[in-house]
């Protein structure tokens, strides 16, 4: 459906200009300079010809073979022009024109009208407010950028047109090739998801990279990205990482989430590799475009300088990458080829006086080792070092082995020709070891993604009608916040195990209830106005007898009325004390882009202090749930330390899946915390001690 943007038979430039410096002039000139093989039809009622080509007064006058229109006209003229295009049979258009959503007010209204009309017309539109599109293979340059990038196998899309122009200039200067180059603009009709889908099936694209600021339909983005990532690497830079502008939230999960957490989770679940910068984006892209995917995580460093080799090894130790363990035959082969002072283990140090033959011998030896998945060729400019010959040695070793190769040739003045030689062999180059290791780590992550087999979400028995009735009753009463007791009933309907909990209104009721439940017990204030009970002295734990219950009841009542005199107090709950186990928190907040965002971390009062939490977008299956649990830094505490039994992993996994099912079944749930979930030792299950739930307003 999007091929018309990349392989048109004929292109019309509506708003073509004869005046140099005008956007309409630049686009027309780029089509000519790019040697677009089909007809180019300028459209301008005020000109008879543009750049030596016949100019048409109106879209309706265009030849019938026109199948792509590029609009460079005032924003209010775009709607009638697109209608004229549709009447002419033109189904694809690029709206370069600005003055729409990005300026707000009338512009935003105009864009909304345009979107609705385009869909009625059955057209596909890129933009508005975009740079345009380039397809290097079909020689299409329908942009106003200053130049055409080399032909390559990297497909690129960007939400920022200004970033596009900078990257194009950089790519031309560094001879980095592209297959497709797409400026999304305001994404009125086509979005990053549409072009990810198109590039995934494009035989001319080996790697997909992009820059985004946000997505509107997060679930579709994840679906498309997950499918694309199974076919080829998808690498994205996402800007706007800070919490500034995030909506206020009342739950722990909402407070800790933020939109960037949702993107990180969505990327991880979809196989998207997240680059931290534009530089890293292209570090990754070149490696995936030019090098084979490694079979495993093991890297071997070959260097002519000890210090940089140690720096590279340090970078490896701080990543998911592993230092390869060279086999005895490999070590003996190195011993025979290198001087006695050489380092024969990983890193392999060929010593500073090594010429290219010694360097090549070391590269060949380690590349032949079955435990080595990647070779990092590292060197510094010594008096005896011929960088050009070193570069050729690296290229030949990579070609002969067929394994993943990276180069780190440190320095500058000695490098220009060597860089060209490495580039001709498809060897990615890095100025320092750290980005090379980070890039290899990205390739390892992608290999792990391809090797993973995600399990589908499980469905558990649940009382949906009971939950729906409770939500309806809360709405009828004009409430969005459910009290603790109601929230506990909701999660109980989805199979969470709860301790006994009885609401009492007098000291005598509390003492009698505690005696019936059995000591020890806990007391908790019950009020729809109090979210954090501990903060106002509304909780007493481990009360051992009737006197302690009576004293605790009075203390809670006095403390809450002092701190929160206007709160509606429904009573004080007497709750069974559940002994033993580790406290964790399960949470959910509804992200505006991706929907239900699940959280897992250590529970109790420390979650917001430690912020040791993991996130995923629901729905999730058992493997994603377990990955969340293992992801937190404090997971060793759950695994058991100093002779402790491990916490019940199966119970935590099932609890996360049940929470996922609940918030997927009820889109009206805005925020939900189960805190703490007391996880008992392995095989003993888990108990939800407390819960809080808010509905969307």
Image (cartoon, rainbow, N blue to C red):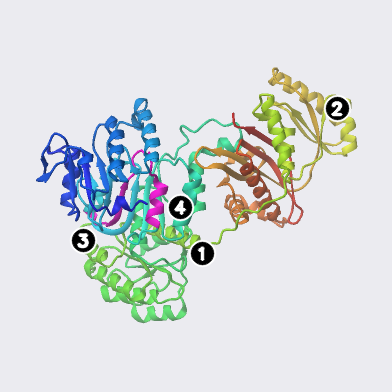
Q: Can you give x and y, in whole percent of width and height, for residue 39 in the image?
A: 18, 51
* Residue 183 part of the magenta segment: yes
- How packed mark 2 is, by other alpha carbons closer than 10 Å (few <14, some 14-19, many 20 or more), is some
Image disc number at residue 414: 3
Q: What stretch is highlighted in magenta?
A: 173-200
Separation of residues labelled 4 and 2 (CA atoms) = 59 Å
Separation of residues labelled 3 and 1 (CA atoms) = 41 Å
Q: Is residue 690 visible?
A: no
- In the rendered structure, are the residues bearing label 4 and label 2 in contact, judged by CB atoms less than 8 Å apart? no
Image disc number at residue 550: 2
- In the rendered structure, are the residues bearing label 1 and label 2 in contact, judged by CB atoms less than 8 Å apart? no
Instruction: Look at discs 4 and 1 and give the one toward the viewer.
Output: 4
- How packed mark 4 is, by other alpha carbons closer than 10 Å (few <14, some 14-19, many 20 or more), is many
Among the two numbered marks 4 and 2 on one chain, the one whose residue lies closer to the N terminus: 4
Which residue has dot 4 on it? 225
Instruction: Assign a secondary structure to mark 2.
Output: helix
Instruction: Look at discs 4 and 2 and give the one toward the viewer.
Output: 4
59 lies left or right of 232: left
Q: Can you give x and y, in whole percent of width and height, for residue 492 in the image?
A: 74, 42
Separation of residues labelled 3 and 2 (CA atoms) = 83 Å
* Residue 286 part of the magenta segment: no
Please identify the quadrant where the C terminus is shown. Answer: top right
Q: Which of the 4 image quarters holds residue 38?
A: bottom left
Among the two numbered marks 3 and 4 on one chain, the one whose residue lies closer to the N terminus: 4
- In the rendered structure, are the residues bearing label 3 and label 4 in contact, judged by CB atoms less than 8 Å apart? no
Q: Nearer the viewer, residue 518 or 41?
A: 41
């Amino acid at each position: 459906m999007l091929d018309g943007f990349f392989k048109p038979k004929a292109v019309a430039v509506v708003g073509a200009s004869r005046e140099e410096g005008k956007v309409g002039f630049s686009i027309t000139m780029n089509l000519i300079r790019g040697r677009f093989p089909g007809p180019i039809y300028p459209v301008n009622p005020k000109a008879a010809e543009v750049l030596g080509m016949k100019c048409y007064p109106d879209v309706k006058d265009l030849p019938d073979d026109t199948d792509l229109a590029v609009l460079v006209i005032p924003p209010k003229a775009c709607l009638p022009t697109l209608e004229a295009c549709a009447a002419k049979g033109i189904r694809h258009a690029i709206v370069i024109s600005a003055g729409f959503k990005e300026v707000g007010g009338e512009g935003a209204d105009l864009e909304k009208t345009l979107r609705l009309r385009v869909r009625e017309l059955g057209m596909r539109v890129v933009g508005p407010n975009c740079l345009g599109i380039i397809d290097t293979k079909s020689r299409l340059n329908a942009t106003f950028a200053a130049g055409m990038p080399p032909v390559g196998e990297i497909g690129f899309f960007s939400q920022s047109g200004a970033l596009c122009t900078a990257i194009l200039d950089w790519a031309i200067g560094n001879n980095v090739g592209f297959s497709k180059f797409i400026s999304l603009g305001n994404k009125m009709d086509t979005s990053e998801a549409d072009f990810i889908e198109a590039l995934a099936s494009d035989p001319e694209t080996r790697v997909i990279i992009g820059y985004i600021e946000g997505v509107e339909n997060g679930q579709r983005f994840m679906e498309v990205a997950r499918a694309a990532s199974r076919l080829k690497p998808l690498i994205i830079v996402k800007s706007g990482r800070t919490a500034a502008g995030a909506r206020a939230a009342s739950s722990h999960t909402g407070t800790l989430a933020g939109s960037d957490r949702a993107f990180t989770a969505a990327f991880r679940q979809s196989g998207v590799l997240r680059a931290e910068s534009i530089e890293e984006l292209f570090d990754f892209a070149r490696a995936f475009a030019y090098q084979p995917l490694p079979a495993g995580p093991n890297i071997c460093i070959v260097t002519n300088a000890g210090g940089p080799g140690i720096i590279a090894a340090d970078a490896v130790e701080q990543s998911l990458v592993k230092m390869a363990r060279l086999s005895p035959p490999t070590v003996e082969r190195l011993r025979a080829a290198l001087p006695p002072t050489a380092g024969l283990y990983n890193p392999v140090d060929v010593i500073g006086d090594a010429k290219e033959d010694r360097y090549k011998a070391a590269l060949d030896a380690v590349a032949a080792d079955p435990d080595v998945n990647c070779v990092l060729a590292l060197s510094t400019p010594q008096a005896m070092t011929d960088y050009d010959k070193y570069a050729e040695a690296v290229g030949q070793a990579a070609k002969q082995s067929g394994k993943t190769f990276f180069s780190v040739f440190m320095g500058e003045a000695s490098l220009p020709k060597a860089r060209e030689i490495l580039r001709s062999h498809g060897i990615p180059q890095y100025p320092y070891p750290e980005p090379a290791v980070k890039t290899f780590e990205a390739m390892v992550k992608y290999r792990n993604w391809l090797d993973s087999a995600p399990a589908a979400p499980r469905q558990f028995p649940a009382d949906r009608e009971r939950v729906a009735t409770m939500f309806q009753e809360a709405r009828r009463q004009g409430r969005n916040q459910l009290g603790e007791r109601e929230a506990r009933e909701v999660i109980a309907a989805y199979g969470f195990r709860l301790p006994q909990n009885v609401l009492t209104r007098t000291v005598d009721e509390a003492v009698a209830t505690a005696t019936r439940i059995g000591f020890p017990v806990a007391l908790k204030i019950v009020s729809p106005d109090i979210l954090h009970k501990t903060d106002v002295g509304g909780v007493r734990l481990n009360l051992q007898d009737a006197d302690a219950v009576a004293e605790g009841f009075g203390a809670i009542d006095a403390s809450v009325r002092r701190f929160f005199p206007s709160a509606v107090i429904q009573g004080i709950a007497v709750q069974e004390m559940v002994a033993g186990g580790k406290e964790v928190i399960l949470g959910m907040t509804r992200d505006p882009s991706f929907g239900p965002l699940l959280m897992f971390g250590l529970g109790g009062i420390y979650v917001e202090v430690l912020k040791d939490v993991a996130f995923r977008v629901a729905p999730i299956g058992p493997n994603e749930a377990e990955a969340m649990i293992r992801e937190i830094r404090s997971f060793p505490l759950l695994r058991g330390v100093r002779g402790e039994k491990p916490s019940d992993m199966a119970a935590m996994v099932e609890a996360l899946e049940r929470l996922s099912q609940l918030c997927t079944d009820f889109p009206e749930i805005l925020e939900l915390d189960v805190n703490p979930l007391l996880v008992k030792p392995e095989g003993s299950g888990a108990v939800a001690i407390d819960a809080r739930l808010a509905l969307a307003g």
